[in-house]
Amino acid sequence: MLWLKLQKHRLFTSYPKVFRMLKKPVYVLGTGLSHNASSVLLKDGKICVGIEKERLTRVKHDGGNDNQSIQYCLDAEGIRLEDVDLVVQTANFDIPEREYHQGKRLFTSPQHPPIVNISHHLAHAYSAIGTCPFDECYIMIIDGCGSPFSQYQTLHPDVPGILMGNFSAAREMICEKDSFYYYDGHKLRTLQKDFSPMSGLQSDQKISLPTTRHSIGGFYAAVSHYVFNNMDDVGKLMGLAPFGKSGVYNHQAFCFKKGRLFIDEDWNKHLNQPSGGYDHFIQNFDYYANVAKWAQEQVEYAVLQCIDERFKTHPPGKLCYSGGVALNAVANSKLSDKLGHTNLYFEPAAGDNGLALGCAFYGWLEYLKKPKVKHNGSTCFGKVYGQDHIENMLVQDMANTRLSFTRFDTEDELLRICAQKLVEGKVMAWFYEGSEFGPRALGRRSILAHPGIEGLQNHINRHIKFREDFRPFAPAVQEEKVHLYFEKGYSSPYMILTDRTRKEFLEALINVTHKDGSARVQTVGKKWSLRFWKLLEEFGKQSGIPVLLNTSLNKKGMPMVETPEEAFSFFKESALDLLIIENQMIEKK
């Protein structure tokens, strides 16, 4: 009798566990359809997979129709669209149709999930809320162009907040340029929001996205176009600035009126020598470097002053920062110095590629009213390609006499040989697990090299990346040792802050230190970059310094590689010496 009672008790008490095992996960899909498009899938409030469209189409900054990025997410998770509970989407200038947006979409069946639309800056805000370590925080969004005012009103007619002007009276299209929010752990409030008229950039080349007339992002894009005669990689203006001199141009580009940021009417009065292409740029390098220095300093002033203006009317607190301007690592470092490093969170995918992330978290936190699940800090949301996939891909080249193939049975042996090759001056492609989400290679799709062997920086720029010689590379360093080599020693896992290389290590870190002594540091921890951390440890044992040159696994104009096939193809066509794919090493003889 006692035995029967015990069996009934065990069966009864196991019900909750069985129920949890059988309970269907809640999937929320976020998708952004502007330029730099992407899709992200949450499973019970956690990111399980995410991808930028350009990684799949191989078209830089690709946007529009989201079929490929959505299908990638579904396939990686092993589910169908019918298994998704909610879709949240955003696009800059329109509200995408369910069945068609620049081509037929996947949402054609009545069984497919409901779709919610949100505005551009709201998506930026939730990308920060969902990934930041704070329970309560302010959120600042600064970019070049967000949603038009009319679209914002249509999507969010009941959102409370202070608009910094009578925008309903505007006769021309006006769009978001900066927004200030507060998140109390449950609800987001709009504190202040500014809009600006549009201003298209004129050129012989197609400009994919117009910008607002009085935005920091629009200013930076305009100067970048002036200096480089294109709109590719606007951020390289920041890499050119250290070669310029301060004080050559003293004209103030930005001004503030009643807390609102404006660009001065004659901000570009001294910009009368637009670049005619790369040869013209090289011939007048010092001139353009001075312009870049001026523009960079103007941006730093505008960012700090804009955030300072917002805090004048609100008590101090933790701050999350996102939007395309939040990718400016130099301005970020000055903001960090001013507000305190531990009080700030810079969203790693701060550009428009992060909009899908924000859409997904809006769906989970605001629409479904689910509690926030703490994010682990990782930015690596891509799918993992198995060993069978890799070996099947390599087998057809195994007979190539110009290549040697080695498979390592232990990680320790792999890392020992990799460090040895790097000490010898070899340049290595490093492909491991799921790809990074966002603009920075953080040790999953990277090119790695010795930070101190003279000439390697120019070799990589010229013969592997095929880009301008002035373009800098980042130092990747173990997070617990960053203070030994860099002055501030801030934690910077997303390569989104700059520091200054200590004077005694300037020669040892010559390939990763800018001309002005600064460096865009990546700190590597064990939490979600264990293998990369171990490689730095082994390299430190063999070389005496646990720092490596790190740059993205691609060349100029090419998105970062996503698949093993793309990595292998790029390795064969470039001057790379080695390719590591998981436990496989391929070396050119």
Image (cartoon, helix red, strand yellow):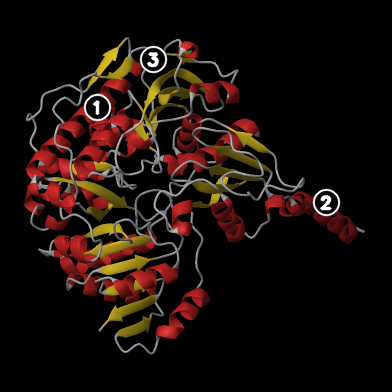
Mark 3: amino acid: His
Residue density around tag 3, few if under 14, some if 14–19, many if 20 or more, within 10 Å:
few
Q: In this view, does 329 lie to the left or right of 386?
A: left
> Residue placed farthest to the right in the image?
1
Q: In which quarter of the image is the C terminus?
A: bottom left
Rendering coords of residue 176 (x, y %): 43, 25
What x and y, as percent, mark residue 288? Answer: 13, 40
Judge from the rendering whether residue 570 lies leftward or rightward of residue 236; answer left or right.
Answer: right
Q: Residue at the spot x=34%, y=55% of the render?
A: 441
What amino acid is found at the position of numbered circle 2 in the picture?
A: Phe
In the rendered image, the quadrant that contains the N terminus is bottom right
Amino acid at dot 1: Lys
Which residue carries the number 2 mark?
12
N-terminal of the pair, mark 1 or mark 3, is 3
Q: Viewer-nearest of labels 1 and 2?
A: 1
Res 314 label: 3
Label for residue 338? 1
Task: Locate residue 545, reporting x and y percent.
Answer: 17, 60
Residue 354 visible at all = yes
CA distance for labels 2 and 3: 54 Å
Q: Give the residue drawn at x 23%, y 74%.
A: 421
Report the disc number at residue 192: none
SS class, disc 3 = loop
Left-right relation of 177 to 13: left
Give the camera-side residue of 348 and 491: 348
Using the rendered image of the protein, determine whether residue 369 is visible from the camera's viewpoint.
no
Q: Position of residue 463 (x, y in %)?
A: 21, 66
Q: How far apart are marks 1 and 2 (CA)?
A: 58 Å
Instruction: Mark 1 and mark 2 in contact? Answer it, CB < 8 Å.
Output: no
Mark 2 residue element: helix
Q: Which of 532 and 321 is in front in this view?
A: 321
